[in-house]
Amino acid sequence: MKAIRNCVFIGFLVAMNQVSFSQEIWTIGPMLHFGIGGEKKNNSFSIEAAYWNIYSFIYSVDFGLEFERNRVRLYSEAQTGIGVTGISLGPVVEFNKGGHPRLGVQGSCWINYFVGFDYRVRYIGKEKLHYTGIYAKLPFATAGLDDDGDGSSWDDWDDWD
């Protein structure tokens, strides 16, 4: 168990090293939301992926697939933030078991980097739903790592002169 924990820690450090020099980052990971307020307090589980561009104005777009009792939701949000906190807003479509798809809008705010907490408000039909959630995201870089154009970031150490 200790060896697995050490391997995960080393893998996380390597990923963070690559991300720290990147200008474009993708994240993916699970989210768990707990319904608050209202009569029904349903929990949901989702998988969310996000693209972050941090060249100048920090912006992002995310895509999620969420599962709740007898419901499946697809959503996308435009996001902005400063890493430790941010906001997002976007459309959501809900598929109910035995019902018609419903369109809505949702907004979120969050705290932390790759492991954190969020608060979400969702309007679907005539319902207003509130959720708090926890998440973990695995980051990986796609651009900004290769400065000499040869397709490899591993040999950039020798370009110091």
Image: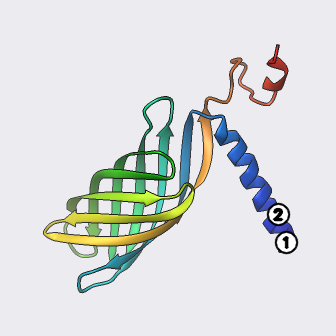
Task: Estimate the x, y position of residue 137 in percent, counting from the top left.
Answer: 56, 57
Q: Which residue is mark 1?
A: 2
The kind of residue on which mark 1 rests is Lys
Task: Estimate the x, y position of residue 56 in percent, counting from the top left.
Answer: 47, 29
Q: Do we see residue 136 in this rendering?
A: no
The kind of residue on which mark 2 rests is Asn
Task: Estimate the x, y position of residue 50 in percent, counting from the top left.
Answer: 47, 48
Q: Is residue 18 above or below residue 66?
A: above
Q: Residue at x 60, y 49 (%)?
A: 139
- Would residue 151 be found to the left or right of residue 127 on screen? right
For mark 1, give the secondary structure.
helix
Q: Do we see residue 90 in this rendering?
A: yes
- Would residue 85 be found to the left or right of residue 37 on screen? right
Q: Which residue is mark 2?
A: 6
Q: Residue at x 49, y 52 (%)?
A: 49
Q: Is residue 45 above or below residue 47?
A: below
Name the quarter where the C terminus is drawn: top right
Mark 1 to mark 2 CA distance (whole Å): 6 Å
**Front residue (pair 28, 157):** 157
Please identify the residue farthest to the bottom as the structure is shown.
39
Name the quarter where the N terminus is drawn: bottom right
